[in-house]
Amino acid sequence: MILLNFNCIFPSCSFKCNDIEEEEFLKHLNEKHHKDMLDISKKENMSIKAVQMITVSNSTVFINSG
Ligand SMILES: [Zn+2]
């Protein structure tokens, strides 16, 4: 199990959570940003899955623990 830190990239959203699974952040995206992601997918002509993947990766906070 990999725990990550997420800082939601949607400007209207202040969701920020440390040490959660990607699954949990996906739940947040689908609950709160389904419409946002749908808009982006239409605008960018991408599948909603692709938008979701990009959103997750852009919202992941990588910490350099070294
Ligand atoms: Zn959010």
Image: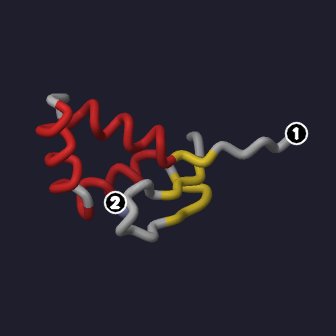
For residue 45, above or below residue 40? above
Disc 1 within 8 angstroms of ligand 1 (CB): no
Residue at 52% across / 57% down in the picture? 7
| Residue 18: percent from left, percent from top | 60, 60
Q: In what element is the residue under mark 2?
A: helix
Where does label 2 land, which residue? 28
Q: Amino acid at mark 1?
A: Gly
| Residue 59: percent from left, percent from top | 48, 48
Residue at 38% across / 43% down in the picture? 55
| Residue 63: percent from left, percent from top | 72, 46
| Residue 65: percent from left, percent from top | 82, 44
Residue at 41% across / 53% down in the picture? 25
54 to the left or right of 32: right
Nearer-the-camera pick, 40 or 35:
40
Residue at 35% across / 35% down in the picture? 53
What quarter of the picture does the N terminus occupy? top right
Count neighbours of disc 2 (C-alpha within 10 A) and say few if under 14, some if 14 to 19, many if 20 or more: some
Where does label 1 land, which residue? 66
- Check contact, mark 2 vs mark 1: CB within 8 A: no
For residue 44, above or below residue 20? above
Q: Residue furthest left?
A: 42
Disc 2 within 8 angstroms of ligand 1 (CB): yes
Q: Quadrant of ligand 1?
A: bottom left
Q: Earlier in the sequence, mark 2 or mark 1?
A: 2
For residue 59, above or below residue 14? above
